[in-house]
Image: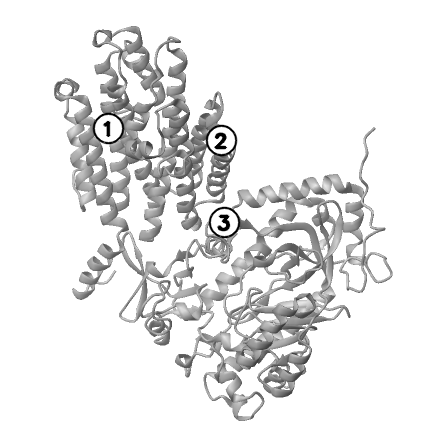
Amino acid sequence: MSVTLKMDFGSYEIKGFHDEMMGDDGMVRSHYKLFQDRLKKMGMKKLTMLQHETDRAQLTLGMTFNVYSDNQGVERILHLDIIPRIIPGKDWDIIDKGLKQRIIALNMFIHDIYHEKKILKDKVIPKELVLSSTAFLKQCEGLNPPEDVWCHITGSDVIRGEDGQFYVLEDNLRCPSGVSYMLENREILKRTFPELFEKLNVRPVYNYSHNLRDMLESLSSVSNPSIAVLTPGIYNSAYFEHSYLAQQMGAELVEGRDLIVQDEKVFMITTKGLKQIDVIYRRVDDDFIDPLVFKKDSLLGTPGLFNAYKKGNVVLVNAPGTGVADDKAVYAYIPRIIKYYLGEEALLPNVQTYICAEQDDRNYVLEHIDQLVVKQTDASGGYGMLVGPKSTREQQQEFVQLIKKNPRNYIAQPMINLSRVPTITESTIEGRHVDLRPYILYGKELKIVPGALTRVALNKGSIVVNSSQGGGSKDTWVVDY
Amino acid sequence: MLSRVADSVYWMSRYIERAENYARFLDVNFNLSLELHPNAKEQWKPLVVVTGDSELFEAYYKSGAKKNVIRFLAFDERNPNSIYSCIVNARENGRAIRPEITKEVWEQINSLYYLVKEGQDKKYWEKKDPRKFFDRVKKGCQLLYGILDSTISKTEGWHFVKIGQLIERADKTSRILDVKYHLLLPDPEMVGSALDLIQWSTLLKSVSAYDMYRRKYGKLTPWSISEFLIFDKNFPRSILSCLLGAEQSLKSITRSDQGSFSNSAEKKIGLLRSQLEYADINDIFGSGLHEYLDDLQLKLNQLSTSIFETFFSTKNIVNLSSKTFQNGKTQ
């Protein structure tokens, strides 16, 4: 007698979190109805089989990344859980509007900081806080990038709290990564659940690479500009993405050593001599792009690149210096930044943030360190972070010392119970915490493709979704139904 | 095309061809060992000798036993030329030029990688009969070249693939031919004996030349076999045919006319090719086939160095271009 394991959501736990599939009443939310029906019909065995197929597909596609802290050469796969995160179109439209408002304001902020610094003079943000940021680059003062746009590509981290409300957790304005996973995850899921794509009206994301190329071209005054993606090289953890994007856009994939600056212009070294480059989508951090101006010992950079940029002979995307707006201490002021430049209230709220540089906030943080999430202001990737309620006393004490020693370097936020999405575990399906990273393109116009990378904390109870810390990913479906 | 990328394309291709040839060596030698008289000594060490890695082999292994040689040439990551290392290197090069190759090419390199990784993880060298593995490697490499051929535009990148493949193949054919020099006959009197003939026909089979040779010459003789593998213009694995193909691709890149050259790589390949065109197998046997093949391998190495200096060395290219700049010429 054969036993078919039926999918049973009777024992699926919600307990106190916002679950993207199930309402608080234990009923499936309407935008997940069709998908859940499909799951129930399929049974656990078939679902597990589909998951295995996906794992194999990822390997063959070479969607691997290297983890910095690991031994070099260890290749990992960003695990793709095949149960999608589904967002109703009307919710998406809120995110879309909110992010556009935010990016416009942040871009005005960056431009202002590198020119008149009005917002500092008007004392909306403490001057020292901004100018002491390691991401503030004095060398960028007075520069005018094309269209006055600095942050061309942003990947903001959006989360949904237990109240069902969306918040912006971080603005990644430097070199946000992950968009290739958004695109490849979709390709894979179209193979996994073709019949659902036929029935559900999932908004498409495929035109992202076209939009990206159009945006990059629009920044150059040259007709038919030559475009390159600058990568630190094959050992970088995001190399798969760099090569993927170059390939999708038909751009050159270059490393610093492929480039040379002559006559204040940037050339790449080809088998037939030197060829000029007009636009560089660089996936190398500010500090490393040009050893003459920034980190002197950088081997990734190209001497003279910054000067060529200053002279307007090459466009750098994102513009150097944008990091000043995603310093985690500046983050706390973003609602005020939006109000200051646009005269509007922020459509997407911030998560409450305590700035350790300010005495009252600092005292609160030190007293409540076991309840808060503490973050280093210039770190990313889940590094330099303390999750208070999940940490040991020693870890907490370590952060107390760190904060006292250098308060400017730390902020703290209440621990937010990120919403959860059903996720395949070894034997069953359980809720796991997720965030959401949409990608915003800003050239002559602002564009956001209706999709995102949903990152999921695969470990039970964990809220850290970073790929370097046990996170996986999900495809994100924006549906109109 | 970026110089660094062209370099990687060239080496990716060489590594794939090398892996395929090693799989051929091993497969054929395995077959040969089955045809020997049960008391005859199996000869595996000559395979290591012709790859030029004997010193390395002796550093890690005590004896030239079958298992050791198979492990060293196929699976040992300490041997930079083992099938395993070649595929890993090809994949690393492929990764570096990902935008230049198609998805299908990349996926095939990846599946080759997982094949050799499995072989290493599961210790295939301890298998009684690892021929299935060699066959899968050989077919996997052939499939890869097939995909390259049918999905990549015939522009610069494709020509560098060709050049890499053909130079590697010329080198390997010369080495396979040299195996015979190292394969010992129990007694000098046995030249022309059944054993001798088995060895020669094995050699032909290892470069898939047996059928084509039979059609052209019929009878197996050392002279005709050597002539076929070195000088035949039409057989795709003969050394001359490889050089002709590589020269043609080189000229497609530089657009030089036939009979002229615009850089040292073209000069070297033209010279080598014409030396082969005017050579005679009897002269070669007179002065020693082994010595001739040794010299050929040296010249192929020099050719590879010239290709590097002409197309891949960024230092050279920047120096040249800077001179052009100073002369006021633009690109």
Which residue is at the front of the view, A455 or A105?
A455
Q: Extreme bottom residue here?
A: A122
- Marks 1, 2: nearer the viewer: 2
Along the horizontal axis of the image, is B294 left or right of A127? left
The numbered disc on residue B123 is 2
Above or below: residue A58 compared with residue B323: above
Helix, strand or loop at label 2? It is loop
Residue drawn 43% across and 43% down?
B91
Asked whether residue A10 is in view, the answer is yes
| Labels 1 and 3 positioned on one and the same chain | no
Asked whether residue A406 is in view, the answer is no
Above or below: residue B40 compared with residue A87: above
Residue drawn 47% across and 43% down?
B106
Residue bearing the label numbered 1: B240
Snapshot colouring: one colour
Helix, strand or loop at label 3? It is loop
Q: Extreme front residue here?
A: A394
Residue drawn 64% across and 79% down?
A366
| Labels 1 and 2 positioned on one and the same chain | yes
Q: Amino acid at mark 3?
A: Val
- In the picture, which quadrant includes the C terminus of chain A? bottom right
Q: Compare marks 1 and 2 and give the one earlier in the sequence.
A: 2
Residue bearing the label numbered 3: A74
Along the horizontal axis of the image, is A380 left or right of B276? right
Along the horizontal axis of the image, is B167 left or right of B121? left
